[in-house]
Image: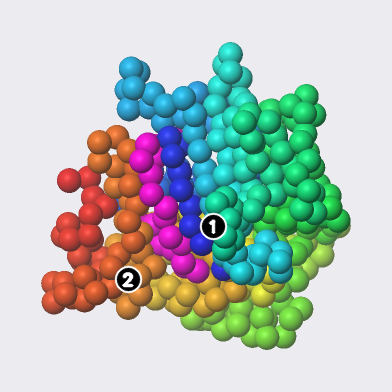
Amino acid sequence: MMLKSIVLTDFLSFGPGAIPLALKPLNVVIGPNGSGKSNLTEAFAVLRAVPRDLPLPIRQGGGVDEWIWRHDPEARAESAKIEIVFEPGQVTKNTADNPVRYRIEFGSQAGSFVVLDERIEHESPEPGKKKPYFYFGYERGRPMLNVKGTNRSLQRADIDQTQSILSQRRDPENSPEIAAVGDRFKEILIYRSWSFGPLSVIREACRADVQTNLLLEDFSNLPARLMTLKRDPQTKRRLLSHLSEVAPNFTDLEVAPEGGRLQLYLTEGSRNIPAHRLSDGTLRYLALLAILLDPGEARLVVIEEPELGLHPDVFPILRDLLVEASSRFQLIVTTHSTQLVDAMTEHPEVVLVCDKPEATTQIKRLDPEEIESWREFGTLGTLWMSGHLGGLRW
């Protein structure tokens, strides 16, 4: 698991007074439209951009002023903050005993994006110390870089205030923790742009020279990624087994080179059916298999509404895939499906309920003991729709 907790303060729909949200290997977020589920996803998108080009998602999202919480035009915060704590040992081996905390605060100066504060430090002070050991931080308004235990001041002129330190100082030898935090953020994957119309990219053959070590977030390399997964005998068996559970008429999956491109086919009897003739649900399920059966070392994967296009009888299989995958990487999943929540009835501790009372998003994790006392009233999805869990418009 990658992250221990996250705190969002005055960030989009998350207002002041935020408390840490503890994260588990699997986190299934439910709640009504407009409650802030997608804004949690946006926080991970910002973190992923930190070591590359921090302002990029901010610009794409309408500019910095749109990212800072406002209750109304007269009550608006001055800045937004994201704070996360890594699990012990996730940054470097040297941090196994004291987790690393990362915090960034950004705002607007003359209408332009600017980093106001940024800090990389231990979660808690060492015995006998008043402050946590830090690797980078602003001290009395000055950026300070800690190189092998010696505090070294960086002049403000040396820091581009529109970018994170993670994109400006990559020195694995002298500052391995700073470099490693950036590497962890780069490993975040977000799957939310599901498109399955007749002209969608997922139906097309892909170039033979595309990236194959993971499924791209626009799904454009699905044939190449499935071909790579099939090369591992164990993963191939699991891939075909799960496919047969949902679509028993398909007995094999083939990827054939055609004119310098790779075309995906499913075998049905004596025929090969190309991707552009497959149903939306079948393609979505293949994409989910390419994500969740990945035997690699992904750190954190966000999937928005994986249930779309799937028949409800697939949801128990999807649940098992999510639970199994969370033993290898951390998962954040958002859903509106009562059937998928029903499938989580035996795992209530993975469900997070998102509400927005008084114009600020609040997320709480279900208490398994409390849920057990309500089990006589039905499954988890039934409890949700009956109002026992929250996460409804009323």
Badge 1 or badge 2: first in the primary sequence:
1
Residue at point 72%, 38% (across, down): 144
Which of 23/198 is in front? 23
Residue 106 in the image, given as x and y percentages of width and height: 56, 31
Q: Is residue 210 left or right of residue 58?
A: right
Residue at left offset 21%, top offset 70%: 370
Task: Say which mark, if any, is on residue 124.
Answer: 1
Question: Circle 1 — which element?
Answer: loop
Q: CA distance from mark 1 to mark 2?
A: 30 Å
Q: Which residues are magenta?
A: 12-30
Mark 1: few, some, or many residues within 10 Å (few <14, many ≥20)?
Answer: some
Q: Quadrant location of residue 155?
A: top right
For the question of whether residue 361 can be seen, the reply is: yes
Check disc 2 and give the amino acid type. Answer: Pro
Q: Where is residue 263 drawn, in percent x and y?
A: 73, 62
Q: Quadrant of residue 266?
A: bottom right
Q: Is residue 287 magenta?
A: no
Residue topped by disc 2? 348
Front residue of this view, candidates 295 and 246: 295
Direction from residue 61 to residue 314 in the image, left or right: left
By secondary structure, the bulk of the magenta-drawn segment is best described as loop
**Is residue 290 in sight in this rendering?**
no
* Amino acid type, callout 1: Ser
Decide: is 227 above or below 43. Answer: below
Residue 15 lies in the magenta-colored region: yes
Pair 1/2: label in front:
1
Identify the residue shown where x is 64% and y is 85%. Answer: 237
